[in-house]
Amino acid sequence: MYGLTVKVLGSTVDSFTRCTHYQSEKDIIAIKFHCCREYYPCYQCHEEHADHPITVWPKDKFHSKAILCGNCKNELTINEYLNSQSICPTCNAAFNPGCQLHYHLYFEK
């Protein structure tokens, strides 16, 4: 393992941060939410387990480490993640490219 142990909240089902909502082989990231600075596997886990609404990361904070690779446990900045072509720059694990459909829930446009 490369990164530190990071606590991921929500309905996780395995050590790769997969949750009850997203369980494909490539669903291996967790997102630190701007509103609470806590990691969750997805927006649905946040909605079910947090007691507050989601706020998106503003563009001027995209240098912040807010993405956790569930394979190597390395934390990526938002910019690193957005520019990764859905591949972890540390361990080359494939991320689900379909996550792009939910970027508006996490990141300012």
Image (cartoon, rainbow, N blue to C red):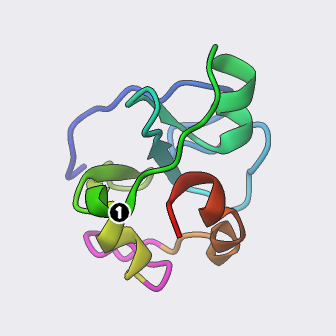
Q: Is residue 21 visible?
A: yes
**Where's residue 34, x and y in %?**
42, 39
Q: Residue at x 22, y 61 (%)?
A: 63
Is residue 91 within the magenta segment?
yes
The answer to whether residue 85 is left or right of residue 24 is left
Instruction: Tell me the residue that label 1 is attached to.
Output: 78
Kindly give the residue lying farthest to the bottom in the view shown: 85
Mark 1 crowd level (few <14, some 14–19, many ≥20, 10 Å Cα): many
Kindly give the residue lying farthest to the right in the view shown: 21
Q: Residue at x 72, y 29 (%)?
A: 47
Q: Is residue 26 visible?
A: no
Q: Residue at x 28, y 61 (%)?
A: 60
The answer to whether residue 10 is left or right of residue 91 is right
The answer to whether residue 42 is left or right of residue 1 is right
Of residues 103 and 22, the one nearer the viewer is: 103
Identity, as a three-letter code, of the amino acid under mark 1: Ile
Q: Number of numbered discs present?
A: 1
